[in-house]
Image: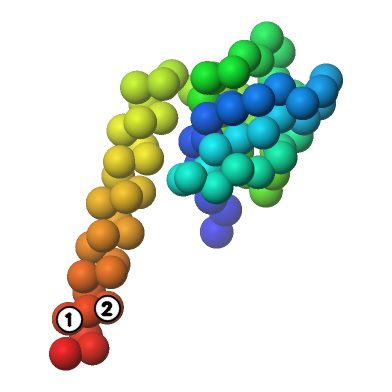
Amino acid sequence: MCLAIPVRIEEILGDETAMADIGGVRKEINVALIADLAVGDFVIMHVGYALNKIDPDEAERTLALFAELDALSQQDLIEAAQ
């Protein structure tokens, strides 16, 4: 299974690289496939490559769903340990 996640561009480093925020973690990613990229843009990232831009509202909704899924998973682990 493959997973592509929305990330926010924090800094443009060069023609083909940028620093992205991935849930509070900063990672250098390849942005060669994206035209007109700007700080603050959200992109879909897969294995370190930005694939395309995404609407900020859609990115925020997706990230909120991931956070909710993580919270539910953590709760399941706590309940299983009791």
Quarter holding the C terminus is bottom left
Would you say residue 31 is visible in this rendering? no
Which of the labelled discs sits on residue 56, or is there none? none
Residue where numbered disc 1 is placed: 79
What residue is rendered at 52% in x and 30% in y? Answer: 8
Residue position marked by numbered label 2 in the rendering: 77
| Crowd class of label 2 (few under 14; some 14 to 19; many from 20; radius 10 Å) | few
Residue lying farthest to the right in this orientation: 15
Judge from the rendering whether residue 21 lies leftward or rightward of residue 66; answer left or right: right
Q: Marks 1 and 2: CB-CB under 8 Å? A: yes
**59 up-or-down from 49: above or below:** above
**Residue type, numbered disc 1:** Glu
Relative image position of residue 80 (x, y in whole percent)? 21, 85
Mark 2: amino acid: Leu
Q: Give the CA distance from mark 1 to mark 2.
A: 5 Å
**Quarter where residue 35 is shown:** top right
